[in-house]
Amino acid sequence: MLIRLLHRIYVGVRKSAAWLQRRFTPAGGFVLGGLVLTGAVSNLDQTTSLAVFLLLLAILLVALLLTTFFRVAFAIERHAPRFVTAGEVFSVRVRLQNITDRLQRGLEYIESVRDPPVTVSEFAARLRPGRGNRSFRVEAPLPPIRLALVRPVPVPVLPPRANVEVRVEILAYRRGPLVLTGGWLARTDPFGLVRALRHAAAPQTVLVLPRRYPLPPLVLPGQTQYQRGGVSLAAGVGESEEFVALREYRRGDSLRRVHWRSSARRGQLIVKECQDEYFVRHALVLDTFCEASQDALFEEAVAVAASFACTVPDQDSLLDLLFVGPTTVCVTSGRGVGHAQQMLEVLAAVKPCRESRMGELEALVLQHSHTLSGCLMVLLEWDQSRRNLVRRLRALRVPVLVMILVPRGKADTFERGPAEDQPDQLLVLEEGRVGEGLQRLERMQ
Amino acid sequence: MNSPSDNVRHATPPILLALALWAWQADLLPWGLAMGAILEALRFSKVRFVPRTEDLNRLWNATVLLFIGVALYLFLARRGLESVGTIVTTSSPATRLDEMREMSQTAVVLLRWLPFVFYPFIVATSVSRTTTLPWEVFSLRLRAMGPEVSGLRPPDWATGQIHPGYLYFALVLFASCAGTARSKAYLPLLLSVLALALWPWRSRRYRAWSWVGMYLCLLVGAAVTERGIERARQTLLALEGRLMQNAGQGDRFDQLHGVTSIGAVGRLKESGRIILRVRTPDGTAPGLLREAVFNRFRASVWGATHREFQTVGTPIDGHIWRFSRRQRSGRFMTIARYTAQGEAPIALPSGTIMITNLPALAVETNYLASARMHEAPPLVVYTVEHGPGGGFDGPPDADDTNLDSLKGPDSEAIEETAQALGLKGQPPDHAVAILERYFATKFEYTRWQDRSTGQTNSSPLAAFLRESRAGHCEYFATATVLLLRAAGVPARYAVGFSPGEPRGDTWLARARDAHAWCLAWINGHWQDVDTTPGTWRQHEAVAAGWSEAIRDWFSDAWYHFALWRQRGGNWRIFVFAAGMIALSWLGWRQLRGSRWRRAREQQTAHPQRTSPLPGLDSEFFALAAVIARNHGPRLPHETPRAWLRRLSLIGTPTASLLDEALQLHYRLRFDPRGLPESDRCRLRELARQLLGTHRAPGFRNRID
């Protein structure tokens, strides 16, 4: 009940804050802040602050009144990229069409981004972030809920019934779908405090992919493994060139394998079949089990996984991305199978799992273990269940590279545990210095 | 077209004018003009330094510590602790309001000093190359998040930047409005300064005359506001006065006007606040402690016919107040209570002989044995000696047997009950015994009886005696007084507290332990007669909520602090010194950095790194030049490590030395902690050794 009430208050405050941010210019924000401060210190003895409060109130009221006389009709046409990367600024070209007979000048354009709804359960999880925040210390905040930050851009003089193009810069904070709902055309009052706004709808979705870190040249551990039933894959990534037979083209076959002469003869695509079921295949295991207080770490873990997802398939091998979300997920990418882009799209949508289901993850990984040349694990903790998984993989002679994300300042005090639990390689990545930590991979090889 | 943000990036607020306005208001005009002139002059200065983020963070931390120190000093110097104590302990809204006003005055002084406090910060930022500062400088929380060391830095517009000049400008204007305006010109002047600051932000959609029109409109509005503000103040003051009139007195009985009413005790009983702390030598219950006595009942209201209070005289040894000439009994109790601005009634047991250790300037009593103190400290802890034959109640007079003021249903109900009990003609002690038995067997206690209940042609007292036969102590006490008077026994109505909650050796009297009882003249002296059923305490205990233990803890903590404060010497200096030590420690940590241990352990090669590119003096560069000359230059996109790998120098006899030198070079250049002196020496040594090797003729051939 209390949580619901707090959630309603939170949603209200969030909407109000967004409204205020859209409605007031930075100068208006200063005046509004002054209004609140003078209002707070005003009493019957402090008549000056009371007078200043009334004066600031009058300024804002006049400014608000002047914003009511804003009449403009416009249409927008947006050219946005399909994919962008979290943490980076991207540009959107917007063509504004003035559909009135009046010349418009001194306007601003503000891209409208849909605020993602925060459910009660998500809100409750953020309120109970877990043991990490049970102190009065200043801690790193949770990842932002806001998806993106939009910069208002000035609009050139807009002639009657004419078009102008503006370039809007947007900083995507978080991965996931970013819905651009339309745009606001804004005009400020003469003092430049309050904006009058008119909206035009133009919905469009941009997928924000996880941020990625540059990785050093990698030599991943492990040998080629026999891939049962993986002939079509082997056709793409295998090593052997021994010819076995001809067969009809199936979806996924590389064009390099097409036997053009036979194809011409038969009138349909025929490919060469090779006896080569041995190739390198790695698993990229993403740990999704974390409390709300570890959400920032989880985002880093996704970024690390995305970095590998982009790099490993370029190395003539296959990569299976394994994680447990609402269901167990296995996505394979590599030459001739799937593109890294697909894996990034999956990673853009992955969400943390609040209940620890390590058993399911272990079963999933072990199910694939016989085909694996090696295993890359991105973990959020180094507890017994995770160590058990590593131990079992090593017992199956699968080389394991473990990357563990730890909060800021905890890298020096990280407990590696007993020797029998140690993976082949263990890399501790400190939050905020992940990119730097990943460069150590080169030295470890 | 310039966007407003572009304008603002190059704009500077009129700080000189703002400081002049503030200084004029605060009567510090020379100071303000000097400060403003310095800031304006710094604008033309060519001396600029490039501060690091850590420098800015520390500067801001030091400024905040300075602010806290000033606030602490003002708080202690202007009796802030006393004000807080009174606000916490008093339940009188009027007193609380007065203390809050006192505190707001302290806040006003603090506001006025703000431009001084933040001046060093703004001067430092004025001589720096940074036009705007990131929000991280001002927020510990944002700093905790920190930037990703190796990640891409978002653009300035996305990180949130603020112009420190505008921040200081707003702060100065805010400080200028603290206190009372010196002149009616203040508001128009403030508007003009504000308008000047807003000029760069104006919308280019409009011509200048629109802006001027809006400014003139607001100027007229400011004049009107100035004129109307005093009228509004008068109206609001009148409204506040009316509110305070209705708010009542709070946790003590009304002695000044000599009037109470049925229901007043009941209202008090809704609170669990600790009013009295009573200690007896043998730990026995202190009994009834009266605060006021009344003798006239009219229209459901008790009043006093003898309202005049008289001073008890000069205290013996400055703190002993003697009330009775009786022999000393040797029975003592110690009572502690808070006063409201030095005024409070004195809770006393019956038979009071003398009070000791009461540090009040005056003690007054009246004929009905109500007592009060004046000019006392915020907390008084006094000892009362009492015993049989003590007391200073005036002997009974005609008012103590008077039933003439009873009207209508009250009179009929009393007459009817007295007849039914056969009270008339009974000796006083018999009459008291009859009444005690009657109320104990036929009546029950309830916490609250609404006046509106019962029939319209009845009174609360008549309804109590005839219909409900249930009520709280006021009903029992009133009925007992009036029935005793009907029996011809002089009786008075007393209100006070009945402490009933032992805690250690102390008995607590909470607000809900407020009680009313009867004083009867028996065998030549006044005796307490309490006919309220003994179960009343259990009924009242129901009102104790779950939070009472927490409130008690705070109350006890504050009580002990107040005791310590009152007994201690110059505690202000102690607290101020402790605060200053804490602030100094924090400041030292900030300025020295929390890395003091690291700094002591390893003296870095760059104790103060002023160059924006550290490590440019690394010996590795000389080595790299030689290698480049011998084996081929480094490509523009290549790191030194990749270059050496490409040259296949890693496998040479000097490979390990080269690798070590490269490691040290990297640390010298990029490790934020710098390179310890010992490692730096090692780098020099390695460079010298490797240079010797690589310059040696034939080396190239060897590796080829």
Image: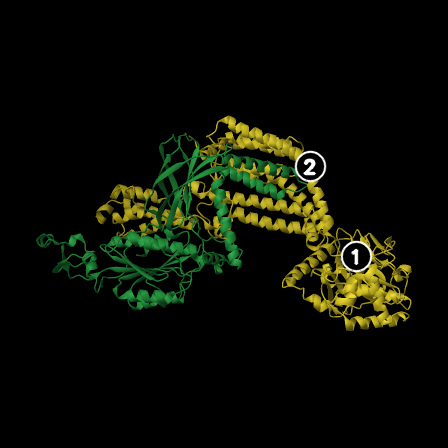
Chain colours: A green, B yellow
Q: From the top left corner, tell me how far across and down residue A235 is, in percent.
A: 18, 58
Q: Residues within 10 Å of mark 2 (few under 14, many from 20)?
A: few
Q: Residue B231: which numbered mark, if any?
A: 2
Which residue occupies the foreground of this view, B478 or A351? B478
Name the residue carrying label 1: B260
Q: From the top left corner, tell me how far across and down residue B273 is, in percent.
A: 70, 60
First of labels 2, 1 by sequence position: 2
Query: Do we see residue B361 in this rendering?
Result: yes
Query: Residues at marks 2 and 1, common chain?
Result: yes
Q: From the top left corner, tell me how far across and down residue A372 is, in percent.
A: 27, 63
Q: Residue at x 44, y 57 (%)?
A: A294
In the rendered structure, which amino acid carries the disc numbered 2? Arg
In the rendered structure, which amino acid carries the disc numbered 1? Thr
Query: Do we see residue B33 in this rendering?
Result: no
Q: Residue at x 72, y 46 (%)?
A: B242
> Position of B267 compared to B209: left or right?
right
Q: From the top left corner, tell me how far across and down residue A349 is, in percent.
A: 36, 54
Query: Mark 1 falls within which chain?
Result: B
Q: Quadrant of residue B369?
A: bottom right
Q: CA distance from mark 2 to mark 1?
A: 37 Å
Q: Residue at x 63, y 31 (%)?
A: B223
Q: Is residue A66 above or below residue A261?
A: above
Which residue occupies the foreground of this view, B289 or B117? B289
Q: Residue A302: which numbered mark, if any?
A: none
Query: Mark 2 falls within which chain?
Result: B
> Position of B549 compared to B331: left or right?
left
